[in-house]
Image (spheres, rainbow, N blue to C red):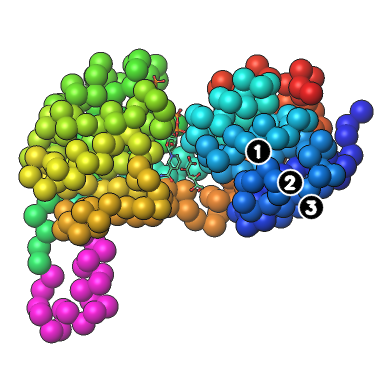
Amino acid sequence: MPQDLKSVSVLMPANFYPRAYERIVDTFDAVLMDTPDPALIPADKRERITGMAALLGPQHVPIIDALPALQIISNFGVGYHPVPSLHAIEKGICVTHTPDVLNEEVADTALAVLLNTLRRFDRAGAWVRDGRWAKDGNFPVPLLSLRGRTVGIFGLGRIGKAVARRIEGFGLPVHYHNRKPAQDVAYPWHASLKELATAVDTLICVVPGTEETRHAVNAEVLEALGPNGVLVNIGRGTVVDEQALIAALQSGTIAAAGLDVFENEPNVPAELIAMENTFLTPHIGSASVPTRAAMGDLVADNLVAWFEKGEAVTPVPEARHLTKHGAN
Ligand code: NAP
Ligand code: 8YV
């Protein structure tokens, strides 16, 4: 018999993303807690909390360990932090994420970051707003262009393919590197990231942040990209060795970088901020109200499906074997 969802206790940050917050508060017995500190879990809820919604990070490990009845964690975002997720899954707790609903939005952002890095529309806009057009004359013509480029995609998955379709629309060739060739595309595949970087002059990173991808974009890869090279990172900050990138941008090893994600968010190295040849955005890949609402709906839908039907809608690949039947 389906559970009365109002009797299901779900832990969630009080300042959670609006749609997810509203849906969870309306549907479940929501337990609100902004700081993930086990000491703050109300004593009468500790044994009762079976669901959790979060933007999962390593700080959640003690919370996971403090909730003996926890069955499912619904993560806001397609990328999921490997540390708390794998820790939870090892304990038999299902972890879900929000794939597909943000593909096109994030791909739009990737192209916006790439175009701004090359053509500096941000600074051109400020030139008008700051009255410099009338005062100082024409906006200085940018050195770089998208024209004639060959684009490499590191991580041709759901979002990577949406980026590739856009690049094709801009009339440019696409190459890629995944661990294995994708079945449904004809773009040239390269067996290593260095081989990809050698073949292209524009590298867009859309891989997840895992142990395997940590600092995959290093000094050697940047050297292979070359002096006309442009790096865009829309995946995870850990994928790029930031110190190697700073050195490559300072020395002219590559021409420019556009970054939406950083190693130690929200802290961005002062060197990257000070440089003329960087375009930086504060992790806004999926940031529009409609897309964040779709993500919020999927966060809530995963919890509802788990407690009503016994299976999540979009478990992360490592949790696909978990069902409510096998949980606490
Ligand atoms: P996805 O469909 O799983 O695609 C990931 C791709 O990366 C796959 O094609 C995979 O191919 C490849 N890959 C994984 N590990 C690799 C490795 N070690 N070496 C080479 N290739 C590897 O994921 P998605 O939905 O496109 O999302 C990708 C990532 O984008 C997310 O994990 C998240 O970190 C990031 N993201 C960022 C934002 C933002 O706001 N900036 C928004 C959404 C997502 P193989 O398995 O064949 O290697
Ligand atoms: C963030 C993202 O989750 O989905 C992902 O992996 O990186 C983004 O969509 C979102 O910005 C929440 O902070």
Query: Are discs 2 and 1 less than 8 Å apart at CB?
Result: yes
Main SS category, magenta section: helix
Disc on the earlier residue, 2 or 1:
2
Residue picked out by circle 2: 41
Disc on the earlier residue, 3 or 2:
3
Disc on the earlier residue, 3 or 1:
3
Q: Is residue 116 left or right of residue 214?
A: left
Give me the residue at 15% from left, 84% from top: 134
Rounded to the nearest angstrom, the CA distance separating label 2 from label 1 is 9 Å
Q: Which disc is residue 63 wearing? A: 1
Rounded to the nearest angstrom, the CA distance separating label 3 from label 1 is 23 Å
Rounded to the nearest angstrom, the CA distance separating label 3 from label 2 is 20 Å
Give me the residue at 24% from left, 79% from top: 130
Q: Is residue 128 left or right of residue 64?
A: left
Q: Is residue 292 left or right of residue 92?
A: left
Q: Residue furthest right?
A: 1
How crowded is the residue under tag 2: few (<14 C-alpha within 10 Å), some, or many (20+)?
Answer: some
